[in-house]
Amino acid sequence: MKNFNRITESDSEYRNLESLSPAELLQAINKEDNKVAECVKKCIPQIERLIKNVVIALQNGGRLFYIGAGTSGRLGIVDASECPPTFGVDEDMVVGIIAGGDSAIRKAVEGAEDNIELAWQDLMQYGVSSSDVVLGIASSGTTPYVVHGLKKCQEKNITTSCITCNLNSPIVQYSNFPIECEVGPEFITGSTRMKSGTATKLILNMISTTVMIQLGRVLDNKMVDMKLSNTKLKERGIRLLCNKYNIQAEDALELLEKYKSVRAALLHLEKSIS
């Protein structure tokens, strides 16, 4: 594409890192990290346009897919995997796919991100269709796995989006709702797991959280549909019930064990009071 400057590969503004003390390194990294939130802020209009379309798709039975390679793929998987326990949605509502399969979550799979056919093959395993939204994550905006995956999706009339940290990168050409968050050169030249990765994580948090709130998965500011899968979450549910209806912890626990859901327990208490 014209005027494509891969700023994620630009030379770091910091030199002779090996000569710096731990304190100097930490201060410099923190200085760069502080720039990220402001960069993300500039992307809010782009993020909002995507979210409105994702909400409509999910309300109509569609799904949200994240596809990426390396750090980008791992961040997508993290966000997708946290939606069921946090918001109580089905595991197939938000799906994270990484080039090279699940083994690539821990260890890079050689050549996977350069395979231009693999993303579509991976998506087809889930029966991806025009009712879904596919979001490609690629800090560089050039990862073949992601770019060609989105290209194939558009050919099949599937709504696409992307998160990239380079402006006017090739991936934008195949994104109906591109999110371009230019964070500048990395602290270590080309190490996009740093500022680019942080920006990506922030944006994914914004997307999934806002979508789930819009779908009614949060009440006031509480996770009433969270899965009560461990002691910490059960205790959180107990506190919520106790604080809202001034009941004893033992009674709250009894309700949670009976209804298996904070929302259901709240509805029971609401009906009882009314």
Image: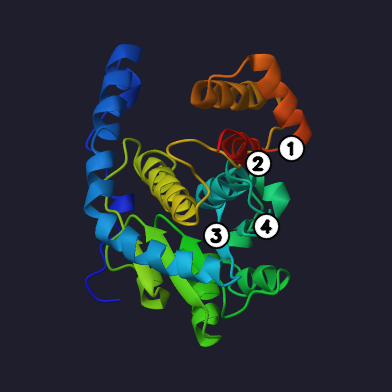
Specify the color scheme. Answer: rainbow
Q: In the drawing, what numbered circle is on residue 66?
A: 3
Say which residue appears at 70% left-offset and 56% top-offset.
Answer: 101
- Which of the two labelled residues, at mark 1 and mark 4, occupies the earlier sequence position? 4
CA gap between label 2 and label 3 equals: 31 Å
Q: Nearer the viewer, mark 3 or mark 4?
A: 3
Q: In the drawing, what numbered circle is on residue 123?
A: none
Q: Which residue is mark 4?
A: 100
- Which of the two labelled residues, at mark 4 and mark 2, occupies the earlier sequence position? 4
Q: Secondary structure at mark 1?
A: helix
Which residue in the rendered view is the most extreme toward the right? 258
Q: Say whether residue 246 is left or right of residue 198.
A: right
Say which residue appears at 55% left-offset and 38% top-offset.
Answer: 274
- Which of the two labelled residues, at mark 2 and mark 3, occupies the earlier sequence position? 3
- Which of the two labelled residues, at mark 1 and mark 2, occupies the earlier sequence position? 1
CA gap between label 1 and label 3 equals: 33 Å
**Around disc 1, counting alpha carbons within 10 Å, would you say few (fewer than 14), some (14 to 19), or many (20 or more)?**
some
CA gap between label 1 and label 2 equals: 6 Å
- Which of the two labelled residues, at mark 1 and mark 3, occupies the earlier sequence position? 3
- Percent position (x, y) of residue 55? 46, 64
Q: In the drawing, what numbered circle is on residue 264?
A: 2
CA gap between label 4 and label 2 equals: 40 Å
Q: Is residue 266 visible?
A: yes
